[in-house]
Amino acid sequence: MLPEVEKIRAAVKGAFFVKREGFKYLPHPSDMDQISERATARYTEYRAAAEFDEVPGFTMRSMIGRAALHKSNVEMPAGLELLKENVDGDGLSLLGQAENVFANILQMKWHILIAEYINSPKAGERLTPAQIAARNIRPAIKSYPRDAVLDWDFRTINGINQLAYLKLMEHKFALDYMTGSRKEFDEYLILFLDAEGNYNWRKETSTGERGDDNLVTVAGKPLKWLPVEIVADIEPEPGQLPQELGFLSPIVDKVMARYVDSARYAEGRRSILPTVNTKGWQGNDWDDFQTMNGGRSYIELGGLSVNNLPREVEMSVLSPSTELDHFVKYREINAQDIRALGGEFSGDETAGKSDTQSNAESADKAAKMLSIVNNIEASYKRLIAYCGMFAGIFQQDAIEQAAQEVQLSLNREFAKTRAPVEDARFVVTELRMSGLFDDETIRQRLKRMGYADDADIERALNAIDGGGQ
């Protein structure tokens, strides 16, 4: 699964990150010789000519833009206001983190969020208010992508089938400021329920360090479950993590195939260039050729070209008969498949599509986005409640009720599928010019085009009358 994850990550980042992987995503065109000097030069040219269409990244950014989570309504419970602007303790806002989660779900299908009480005192440790402030003890929500999850286990503990073990990895660097040397290592965070069904955590490193097990208590009582949310594009089946990849996965597969095909296409075009054969060269003929052709040191091709040759030199040009129509046809079909999967090429928008087709595709994508946003919102409500529990605001045994009371409403305006203003402007102009329709009839037409309520319709009409968006 890791190779597929890495492929999606590279494709979303763009052409540079795909091309730098060489053979991994663009096999050598020769099955026989891949290491000789000639084969290496061939591959360098082959890869340079390959075109990677940045559809995955563009599609993801387009969907993030449409989701517009920054327009969401967030009202934190009293005592948890700091989460709104600094949700993870490292300065990331809650809506900024939610947007990252949305992006990761589009790629990987699911994402991990964990509520923590960071820098909390050890068992029996008593701190003054000043020490608490200096240590930055506070609740936080930490975010981990799918590729950080190394292992997990679900078990029936405390009478509930639940996540009982989770191992996460974070790749880190330790920089020695004196020498400038940098040491790389992996840090593992392990969350688990012990034999008594109590929540513990510990940290380990790839260098062999192993921290102590830390029992987590709330109001003096051990916590009986992991404060973890598995956020996915659809709600996961109980007791398992989804094996499928995200919305962008099949789009990436098609784009990668297109990338390989583009290299073959480019090499094919080069191979069918005219071939020039010459014979009869003697002595200083090449110097004479340059003198006879104004100093030019190459044979020129083309309808207006003239090559003056020394007396005994003969030249023939072989025109190719190979055709590349099948490459062109494949790329057209491939692009259609990508769009059918929801992929967007830069500049695509709704060009060349009917209103019905554009609205249908928009509605389909909006439905997928809505499911993701619904699940993100539900998870954050529970996580905020978990944070409130760690801060002593909510009780451990009333956490579900507390989650329902959290005032968090993520933006869903994108789900109101409607025709673009340009299309609405054209329709309204045509109706008005006909002189057969009054404004009320035009308003009804706008409703059928997806402009839902009266205020929405008036804004559309104003934009149309004023020529704005």
Image (cartoon, rainbow, N blue to C red):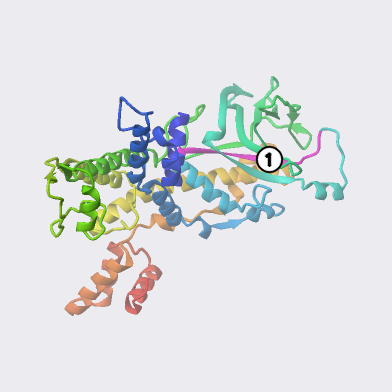
| Quarter where residue 437 is shown | bottom left
Residue sitting at 53 percent across and 45 percent down? 378
Residue sitting at 30 percent across and 64 percent down? 447
Query: For mark 1, does the 10 Å Cα neighbourhood hold few (<14), some (14 to 19), or many (20 or more) residues?
Result: many
Q: How many marks?
A: 1
| The N terminus - image quarter | top left
Residue 278 percent across, percent down from the top left: 16, 43
In-front residue for pair 144/259: 259
Q: Is residue 95 left or right of residue 217?
A: left
In-front residue for pair 117/350: 350
Residue sitting at 32 percent across and 78 percent down? 465
Residue 425 percent across, percent down from the top left: 28, 71
Q: Amino acid at mark 1?
A: Glu
User: Is residue 132 visible from the viewing direction of this image?
Assistant: yes
| Quarter where residue 66 is shown | bottom left
- Magenta residues (range): 107-122
Residue sitting at 47 percent across and 30 percent down? 2
Residue 249 percent across, percent down from the top left: 39, 38
| The C terminus - image quarter | bottom left
User: Eyeballing the image, is 194 above or below 8?
Assistant: above
Q: Secondary structure at mark 1?
A: strand
In-front residue for pair 239/447: 239
Label 1: which residue?
Answer: 116
User: Eyeballing the image, is 134 above or below 153?
Assistant: below
User: Is residue 402 visible from the viewing direction of this image?
Assistant: no
* Residue 115 in magenta stretch: yes
Which residue occupies the extreme top position in the image?
Answer: 195
* Residue 3 in magenta stretch: no
| Quarter where residue 211 is shown | top right
Residue 226 percent across, percent down from the top left: 64, 32
In-front residue for pair 288/317: 288
Q: Is residue 36 left or right of residue 310?
A: right
